[in-house]
Amino acid sequence: MKRTQWLEALREAVAGLEAWEERWPGDAAPEVDDEARRALEALVTRLGGNYPFFHPRYAGQMLKPPHPVAWAAYSVTALINPNNHALDGGPPTAELEREVVAKLAALLGYDPGLEGHLGHLTSGGTVANLEALWVAREQHPGRAIAFSAQAHYTHGRMCGVLGVEGVPVAADDRGRMDLDALEDALRSGRIGTVVATPGTTALGALDPVQAILPLARRYGARVHVDAAYGGFFALLARRDPPLVDPAVFGAIGEADSAVIDPHKHGLQPYGCGCVLFRDPSMAAHYVHDSPYTYYSSAERHLGEISLECSRAGAAAAALWVTLEAIPLIPHGGLGERLAAGRRAALGWAECIGESARFRLVMPPETDILAFAPVPAGRRVRASQISAWSQRLFERAMSEEVYLAVAGLDRALLQARWPDAEIVWDVERVSVLRSVVMKPEHEGWWPRLHAALERLSEELIARG
Ligand SMILES: *Cc1c(COP(=O)(O)O)cnc(C)c1O
């Protein structure tokens, strides 16, 4: 088993750490006892209730296990459990964090020099976006924050948390922020910040960052880029030929702030997001002088530029090791892994486009596909499409094909499928959604598709 090899690698790393611990004799580590063994056994039984996220048969949500090298790095570092709040909580992992954040800054087009940007890891995209919106509010007090109707729901919610007006902007028929609608909102003069999402959560659509930037600037607004999901696709924009729109990703470096989630496409365990600011002087917003923090040196501590206090140094260590082993390069490294998923999405989309039983919602812009059972040459109700999608989702799962269901506005589908004979009897329509984010999906999608064709034939024949 490949897992066993990784256990061996982890064992060697743990042995190395034990050699370091032996400098302080008087081992405090507890013995393995029966209670611990029994509890672990019980856990493994309970964990069996999960879907097989590791397997290419799972193509539902944005879920997959971390790369084993990240898991091993996290595990060995967790034995020490450094806290990246302050340098005193673990100088080595604080240093590793600065190095990986610089790499992520370079990936998104920011100046990777230590004084060239401001950034840190977070527990995820939610907190990373919250920090960016909070700084946006501080920079433009009293002004609203605009985001696309297809943006992650966290933006609307966090506007509530921050006491800022949130302004949803209509999306176009490809799920991207509509530029005319954005300009209408900007003309009111009350928008202080525009959020662009290259890689939306539902459809993987790319908001046109390169067009949003000059528009927002014309009206004196900041731009925040929520690349929590899409950020790593910047690698594919740099491939020759590019596998995603290079104009979108080439513009992110001009934005005031950006978020990227290594626990989405960076092969990390949960607990790893990142927020970046183009202007390092944004650090001033974070200033505090609590009497109980333990800043013992004049050097800047990560807790002085982060909203969260305690953070796992193990997360920084895991990302650092991963990026050493699997570098952020367009060809090879992480680029190769993402390219396989992207090709899977393109191949599967083409196949769905030719199917007589399915309709593609839109050509995928990343590695997320949305499609629905819509039999060709037959009049159907939109509510029937929703019911079929739901039933297909459940039937597929019983055959070990795992997809997800997403609800889309009827207006979007109506614009996408002008020729379809659909009676639009509901405002929101359920469609199937699939995230093909594992490299193995490139070889597997034809099997997943074949299962869906067969199941949909049965379903549609029945009514
Ligand atoms: C996942 C996601 C978020 C939320 O991030 P978490 O890491 O789940 O907290 C925000 N925005 C986008 C675009 C996302 O895909």
Image: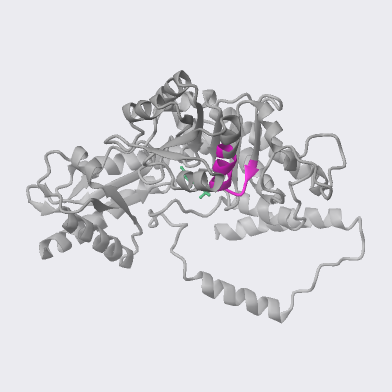
Give left or right: position of 35 versus 141.
right
State yes or no: residue 129 in magenta.
yes
The quarter holding residue 208 reads top left
The magenta stretch spans which residues? 121-133
Residue drawn where x is 74% and y is 39% of the image = 304
Indicate how the structure is coloured in the image.
one colour
Residue drawn where x is 60% and y is 26% of the image = 278
The quarter holding residue 305 reads top right
User: Residue 238 location, x and y as percent?
Assistant: 47, 26
The quarter holding residue 390 reads bottom left
Looking at the picture, tell me which residue is in the foreground, 148 or 88.
Answer: 148
User: Residue 173 location, x and y as percent?
Assistant: 26, 36
Looking at the picture, tell me which residue is in the foreground, 392 or 236.
Answer: 392
45 to 158, vertically: above or below: below
Give left or right: position of 293 versus 409.
right
Give left or right: position of 292 versus 173.
right
- The overriding secondary structure of the stretch rendered in magenta is helix
Question: Could you tell me if residue 267 is visible in this image?
Answer: no
State yes or no: residue 183 in magenta.
no
User: Residue 243 location, x and y as percent?
Assistant: 39, 30
- In what quadrant of the picture does the N terminus appear? bottom right
Question: Could you tell me if residue 118 is visible in this image?
Answer: yes
406 to 28, vertically: above or below: above
Residue drawn where x is 38% and y is 53% of the image = 59
246 to 53, vertically: above or below: above
User: Residue 410 location, x and y as percent?
Assistant: 22, 46
- In what quadrant of the picture does the C terminus appear? bottom left
Looking at the picture, tell me which residue is in the foreground, 357 or 105.
Answer: 105
